[in-house]
Amino acid sequence: GLDYPPLTAWHSLLCGYVMHAVDPASVALRTSRGYESSLSRLVMRLLVMASDLLIFYTGVLSAAEALDPSPKIEILSLD
């Protein structure tokens, strides 16, 4: 999981909004305890994969950019 409490709270809130938009019964107050459906499992798994990829690849790209000693190359220049 995320190890910075404010970021974890925002991440949980965002996931809750997505779940509420897709399957409101899965996040309903007092009635969602023990709730399971194939849709809610699928959405939760997709949210985990998306957030892991976003966080992991951001870190990998940042590390690669910091460790790469070669000069940056302009890919396309229309000047």
Image (spheres, grey):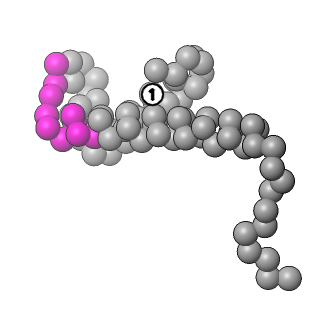
On screen, residue 76 above or below 22: below
- Visible residue check, residue 17: no
- Residue at the image point whose x is 55% and y is 41% from the top: 57
Which secondary structure, mark 1?
helix
Magenta span: predominant SS is: helix
On screen, residue 17 above or below 27: below
Residue that mark 1 sits on: 12
Give the percent coordinates (x, y) of residue 34: 16, 19
Q: Which residues are magenta?
A: 34-43
- Residue at the image point whose x is 21% and y is 34% from the top: 41
Residue furthest out toward the front: 70
Q: Would residue 25 be found to the left or right of residue 48 on screen?
A: left
On screen, residue 34 above or below 36: above
Q: Quadrant of the C terminus?
A: bottom right
Q: Would residue 26 be found to the left or right of residue 20 on screen?
A: left
Q: Residues within 10 Å of mark 1 (few under 14, many from 20)?
A: few
Give the percent coordinates (x, y) of residue 27: 28, 29
Residue 36 falls inside the magenta stretch: yes
**In the depicted view, which residue is nearer to us: 70 or 28?**
70
- Visible residue check, residue 28: yes
- Residue at the image point whose x is 79% and y is 77% from the top: 77
Q: Would residue 16 be found to the left or right of residue 56 on screen?
A: left
